[in-house]
Amino acid sequence: MSSTLHQITMSYSAEEDRLLLRISTTEKSEFQFLLTRRFVQVLWPALMTVIEQEDLGTGKNLSPTTKKAVMAMEHQQSVGASDFTRKHDEDSRNLTPDPLLVVGGSVNPGKTGITGLLLKTHKGAEINLSLNKELLHALCKLLIETTMKAGWGLDLTVGDAAAVAVPADMKQVH
């Protein structure tokens, strides 16, 4: 079954010490997944590899500082188009009454700018998500914010926004 993504939200369940990832489609179907700290630790470097490949393209000879600055700028630009203030739509039909525990997966960069995210669950199900650049960065933003709320100490970041800042002793010219 192929459906178009409509909304992605994430929250922290202190009782289970897991992230609850909710994904709804334009057909008003919803899927819920639980992400563990260990899974997020493994997933994050794979997401960053894909973002670096997409954001830098042919700029592979850039210095590490420049790479991080470019990634941070691209991230800010991509998430700027998303609305993170909306609450999750509650009128979707939940196809997973009990959230599925994600135990593995993979991240595959696409040739057309669409990243494939495969989530493998403890019950053997495999869910494929196709994420454009904006959705990929939105997922990263949700992971950053929610792991911070969880107090997991993962220090997730996309690039280095500080590398973009103008030093205090320099004047900015427009």
Image (cartoon, rainbow, N blue to C red):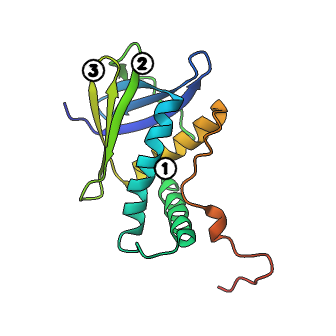
Asked whether the residues under the numbered discs 1 and 3 touch, taking CB atoms below 8 Å apart as contact, a structural biologist would say no
Asked whether the residues under the numbered discs 2 and 3 touch, taking CB atoms below 8 Å apart as contact, a structural biologist would say no
Which residue occupies 65% across, 34% down?
149
Quadrant containing the N terminus is top left
Residue 99's disc number = 2
The reply, left or right, for residue 39 in relation to residue 163 is left
* Residue extending furthest toward the bottom: 173
Q: Is residue 65 visible?
A: yes
Q: Position of residue 28 (x, y in %)?
A: 33, 27
* Residue denoted by label 3: 124
Which residue occupies 40% across, 72% down?
60
Q: Gap between marks 2 and 1, in whole Å? A: 25 Å
Position of 47 relative to 119 (above/below) = below
* Residue extending furthest toward the left: 1
Local crowd at mark 2 within 10 Å, few (<14), some, or many (≥20)? some
Q: Position of residue 92 (x, y in %)?
A: 38, 24
Which residue occupies 42% across, 57% down?
51
* Residue denoted by label 1: 82
Q: Gap between marks 2 and 3, in whole Å? A: 13 Å
Of labels 1 and 3, the one closer to you: 3
* Residue type marked 1: Ser
Q: Gap between marks 1 and 3, in whole Å? A: 32 Å
Image quarter of residue 91: top left
